[in-house]
Amino acid sequence: MKKLLYLLLLLPLGFFASCSDDKDLPSVDITVNIENAVDANGKIYIVEGEPLTVAGIDVKSLNGKASGISGVNYVLDHVGIGYNIVQPFGGTISANLLPAGNHLLTLAFDVLQVDKSIAYAQLSTVVTVVPAVEDLPEGSTLGNVALTYHLNPQN
């Protein structure tokens, strides 16, 4: 009985020993595709009364190893508003939650890659909601916007 007890006491040490190197993190580019928006002055612009639609999130490996992300938490102005576990991880934020002004959109998820430690990412951008199309930055037109984030711990 004592031998069994000693083995059970050693079990937690096996979990600590099996952890991989936290410095060996994924190397990927993550692209967030937003519909019916404008990318200008470091912000995303949409028109009041229209929803904010993330069409999907794409992951591209920088080292040739298979990679992906887990479910995505959608956070607007520091309040969780949704979660999507289905690829391509898109989501729509209702226009009712987007009055005119600046809002902070954050997407949070785990980044996975073969032979790498799991990493946690929070991608944030400012979304400016304008009252009308005429209030968009000069010379811009609504369309699809692709925001690319470079995650590479070796650089």
Image (cartoon, grey):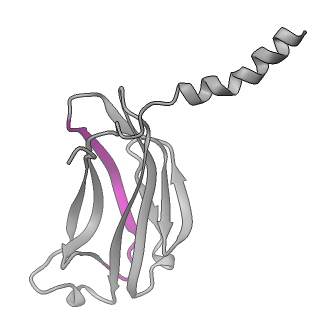
The answer to whether 42 is drawn above or below residue 23 in the figure is: below
55 inside magenta stretch = yes
Q: Main secondary structure of the magenta part?
A: strand
130 inside magenta stretch = no
Instruction: Give the extent of the magenta segment.
Output: 46-62
Please indicate whether residue 42 sits to the left or right of residue 115 in the image. left
> Residue placed at 50% from the left, 78% from the top?
96
Q: Which one is nearer the viewer's eye here, 60 or 141?
A: 60
The answer to whether 40 is drawn above or below residue 138 in the figure is: above
Rendered location of residue 150, percent (x, y): 23, 52
Rendered location of residue 49, percent (x, y): 40, 80
Please indicate whether residue 129 sits to the left or right of residue 27 in the image. right
> Residue placed at 36% from the left, 37% from the top?
68
Please state, as top left, top right, bottom left or bottom right, where the N terminus lies in the image.
top right
> Residue placed at 20% from the left, 38% from the top?
62
Q: Which one is nearer the viewer's eye here, 114 or 46?
A: 114
Please indicate whether residue 83 sits to the left or right of residue 32 in the image. right
Q: Residue furthest right?
A: 1
Instruction: Choose top left, top right, bottom left or bottom right for residue 98.
Output: bottom left
> Residue placed at 54% from the left, 59% from the top?
82
The answer to whether 103 is drawn above or below residue 29 in the figure is: below
